[in-house]
Amino acid sequence: MTYLNSFIFCGVVCLIGQLILDNTKLTPGHITTIFVVVGAFLDIFNIYDKFVLWAGGGALVPITSFGHLLIHGAMDTVNNFGVMGLFMGMFDLTSSGIVAAIVFSFILSLIFKPRD
Amino acid sequence: MEKAAYNKIVKKNTPSENILKNAIIAFVIGGIMGVIGNALVQFYSYVFDLSSKDASVFMIITLVFLGCFLTGLGFFDKWVNFARCGLIVPITGFAHAMMSAALEYRKEGLVTGIGMNMFKLAGSVIIFGVVSAYIFGILRIIIMGG
């Protein structure tokens, strides 16, 4: 059942992005940025957590989960250190994605040649 | 004046069916990406006996690797042109943005090329993500109490 839910959730998020892309002058960069902000916004009231429970891994695939994970990492340290924890734990959960993207793209860009 | 006329011509010649087709393709491809993500989470939590939270980290790393690798091979640009938001909105789009920036600027050298330009496209995601997460985090502390 989570497979169907994750198909629907991820598909709908991509559909919204595509509709914004086709009907406005915004670039893909704008859309991914907007989606990260929306993901962080939905986490103020724990709304995104409900999506994660409903859709399983499918809710973590769209870039909206990046904003969600930023806030969740920060909140874990906020519980221990107060407001200063916002600075300390922000990347705790997202570091894997960022580090993987940096390392893989650095190494692979040395191996592969650019194509048009 | 000229711009308005140009926009009119563009609007007339852009078939409305195209938007519908693009939307359906983005929905289906995006949905397939979601299913792949969910399947990877189930797979990792089953094979390595991880909690679903740790397995989702493995899933994100796998998708980022696939995004970088396929971009390096040259397939991914064509797929992105076809599926548009279906591949840009998932985490693969983030990997694709970083990898294509790294590939494009490689000829300018390691430091001045790759090092300085890798975040050219993907940096806005991190910057806006962090700033908005900071502001919304404060709101969340005030509203929800952490």
Image (spheres, rainbow, N blue to C red):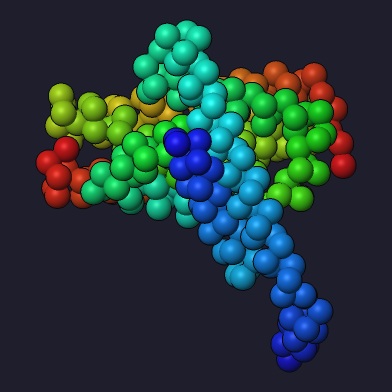
Q: Residue lying farthest front?
A: A1
Total number of numbered labels? 0
Q: Residue lying farthest top?
A: B48
Is residue A80 something that shows in the picture? yes
The quarter of the rendered structure image containing the C terminus of chain B is top left
Name the residue rendered at 74%, 67% in the picture. Answer: B18
Is residue A85 something that shows in the picture? no
Foreground of the two, B33 or A33: B33
Residue B54's place in the image compared with A7, above or below, is: above
Name the residue rendered at 64%, 24% in the picture. Answer: B65
Q: Residue B4: x percent and y percent?
A: 72, 87
Q: In this view, does B86 lie to the left or right of B38?
A: right
Name the residue rendered at 75%, 33% in the picture. Answer: B71
Q: Residue A31: x percent and y percent?
A: 55, 55
Foreground of the two, B29 or B96: B29
Residue B34's place in the image compared with B47, above or below, is: below
Name the residue rendered at 77%, 75% in the picture. Answer: B15
Residue A110 falls in image quadrant: top right
Q: Is residue B20 left or right of residue A6?
A: right
Foreground of the two, B130 or B49: B49
